[in-house]
Image (tube, grey):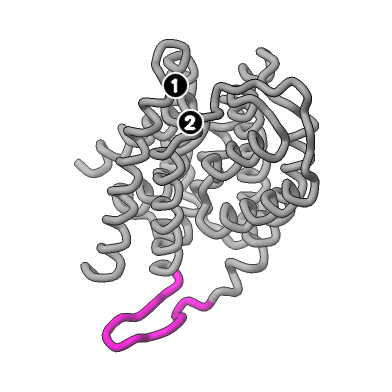
Amino acid sequence: MLEIVGYVSSLFIGVSLGLIGGGGSILTVPVLVYLFGVDPVTATSYSLFIVGTTSLIGAIPKYRNGLIQLKTAIVFGIPSILSVYLTRRFLLPSIPQHIVSLGNFELTKPVMLMLLFSVLMVFASYSMIRGNGKEEQIISDQEFNYPMITLEGFVVGVLTGLVGAGGGFLIIPALVLLSKLDMKRAIGTSLLIIAAKSLIGFLGDLPHLQIHWALLLDVTALAVIGILLGSWWSKKIDARILKKIFGWFVLVLGIYIIIKELFLK
């Protein structure tokens, strides 16, 4: 029964990415861990492949429609790709399996990753629920705040490397505010950045990863179908309303994971 829910949720991962340009990847690790029983550390690796492949396919029609700024993707993507690869290749494997014990509570590497992920979900939900009053604003003269874009790209890459989320909820506001992109181009450019850094991060895992390819490809295929459906629905549905609803869902799920990892073990 849980696997059926997992496959349906896999479709929803892609739908969310197609509709609002982010958010779906924040569901990937919880779906893999709680519905398919994948180890949290392995789930972050699988998430990079699923999110990267889905975003890449979703970026293709965006590029054809002129909704991707390649210069912006390169400026933001280079530090992000570098940091996510280094995080997956060196930082994550160096974290000990058992970190600290506090009374009856033991903070292990999987628990730490799930807690970090849940905190990220709470922040992501706030960004989705609050929205952005300037989302529909189109700025014709693009500008670059290179130091801030580089810093943001590096930080997003580290977070992606640790928890396996694409980070669209961080990338899109950064592209709007720091490189002066309109919302539609920010979403398209974000998908390309997410695809590049996620897939390269996954390559950093290959030397020490045993892959259940059947599960990974099944979930990825459903997410790809979802992003194609989401991209089509985005022309018919008010994405701002959906984004707020999805934000509340992510908030509840994030709080649930915190409670489960801290108190229900």
Q: Label 1 amino acid? A: Gly
Q: Position of residue 244 (x, y in %)?
A: 36, 33
User: Counting other residues with Cα less than 10 Å from the Cα at mark 2, is it few (<14), some (14-19), or many (20 or more)?
Assistant: many
> Picture coordinates of residue 135 (x, y %)?
54, 27
Q: Position of residue 148 (x, y in %)?
A: 73, 50
Q: Give the secondary structure at mark 2.
A: helix
Looking at the image, is mark 1 or mark 2 earlier in the sequence?
A: 2
> Residue, x 40% and y 61% (percent of image)?
114
Q: Which residue is mark 2?
A: 17
For badge 2, the amino acid type reads Leu
Total numbered circles:
2
Read off the magenta span.
Answer: 96-109
List the residue tagged with mark 1: 230
Mark 1 in CB contact with mark 2 (< 8 angstroms): yes
Question: Where 181 sits versus 75, above or below?
Answer: above
Is 100 included in the stretch rendered in magenta? yes
| Residue sitting at x 43%, y 69% | 112
- Find residue 88 and report its horizontal and vertical position in percent: 62, 60
- On whether residue 118 falls in the magenta region, the answer is no
**In the image, farthest residue toward the front:** 133
Q: Quadrant of the N terminus?
A: top left
Which of the numbered marks, if any, corresponds to residue 119? none
